[in-house]
Image (tube, rainbow, N blue to C red):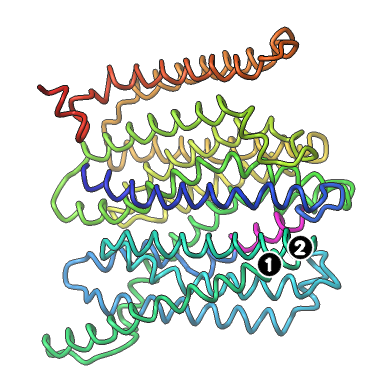
Amino acid sequence: MKSLAKDTAIYGLSSIVGRFLNYLLVPLYTHVISAAGGGYGVVTNLYAYVALILVILTFGMETTFFRFANKEGENPHCVFSTSVVTVGTLAAVFMAAVCLFIRPVAMTLGYVGHEDYILMMACVVALDAIQAIPFSYLRYKKKALKFASLKMLFITLNIGLNLVYFLWLGKDDVFYVFALNLVCTGLITFFFIPEFAHEHVAAREYCKANGIPFRIVDFALLRRMLGYSWPVLVLGIAGILNQTADKILFPLVYPDAKEAQVQLGIYGACVKIAMIMAMITQAFRYAYEPIVFAKAKDGDKKEYYAQAMKYFVIFTLFAFLCVVGYMPLLQRILGVEYRAGLRVVPIVMAAEIMMGIYFNLSFWYKLIDKTIWGAWFSAAGCAALVAVNVAFIPQYSYMACAWGGVAGYGTAMLLSYFVGQRKYPIRYDIRGMAEYVVITAGMYLAMDYIASSPSLHRMSCGTALQLVANTCMIVVYLAVVVRRDVPLSSLPVIGKKFRK
């Protein structure tokens, strides 16, 4: 648990700080790019496609790399090189296909005359796919600091260039959003040359020491890895569709094509605030996934998994209250034209919490090499999400997108829990976690009631009073957590004083 906490802190700090810095682009774009023009809707739509294609190109090799690199009898160096070559080949084929069929692709997506947008984002997603395995290698080697440093470098460089182009040079074209992303992504790729060189030398030495022939790609190993990874790929596609299908479907389903980009831009901007949950889940995953597969070799660790789940729920509910409680301040991130969509934020955050719980539940089938279950669960969740979006977007606009996420993640979460309890039972503290959910729900309703009070808005210090009341509720939540599950004496540094 200490190792998990330390790595989560490093990954989480880089992720939190990175996302916070990345939020600087949201006010920049939402103030420079008019909502009425639909430009931010174009950004939201294309980035949704990028996320989906990235999952396809990585082909589940990130999780597969961890599984096989930690497997007894496998050559971890060969696992690395085989994974890199496989993903690199898929990325090259993808780029060739995009260049060859750019015209029909642009017509299908509705970007005729803006083929350059598609080409730039295709290059970005191909480079991101190639970087995926080296980033996983850094996690495998517990090089959390280098991992975090490269992530931060990309974000800092991207923000700096955006500020130069949009503020100093006065640009207002979404072309520069995509062009600057491509420049920064390309630069980060060069920082992995030391990892590639080190692994090449290490692989040769390993093969020489063990008397086996050196191969960059072991096709027998590749067949075993693909057998493990394709269900992970299906799971990943279904999972990413749960995050992006609404943004892909919206322009296709909404009755008015021009207005669709406007509404999608508003929704995409507001979802950025809610993405703190995705950020926390990702930070937890970066630290948790390598530890789980490593612990699997030490025997049954079901109690560890149950404990980690509970602390994950406690922390994400705390984050939920913080975002909702300080919404009067956070809403200023967005341009005034975009704030009408803020009502989706609590709904999207609730969906992201369900997604995080589903991720924690997913290890039972990964550890018994039955990843096909994850594919079925995610596919069922994706089907629920798509059904809600297609049925209700024409009438309820982006509110249907928000509730579709709840339907999708909720379906996958419940299926994984009930099937998992039969196949690989783990005694989660359901009652304790449910009590925290009830407490959080009660505090959220109280915060919402205060925010909608007409008398509060008539007062000159109404916002300040609202923030004070919300802060008090958040402190109460923390007090409950400390009293029940995180006694101060158990904490590092300050815990010494309480133990005395």
Q: What residue type is labelled 1?
A: Phe
Disc number placed over residue 174 in the picture, else none: 2
Q: What stretch is highlighted in magenta?
A: 41-52
Callouts 1 and 2 close, C-beta under 8 Å: yes
Instruction: Left or right? Give the position of 345 relative to 417.
Output: right
Instruction: Left or right? Give the position of 98 relative to 155.
Output: right
- Image position of 488 with respect to 246: above or below: above
Near-viewer residue (147 or 165) = 165
Q: Position of residue 488 (x, y in %)?
A: 23, 24
- Image position of 294 with respect to 132: above or below: above
Say if the magenta span includes residue 50.
yes
Q: Name the residue under label 1.
A: 178
Q: What element carries label 2?
A: loop
Near-viewer residue (384 or 498) = 498
Q: Position of residue 303 (x, y in %)?
A: 21, 36
For the stretch drawn in magenta, the main secondary structure is helix
Near-viewer residue (61 or 499) = 499
> What is the C-alpha distance between the residues marked 1 and 2?
7 Å
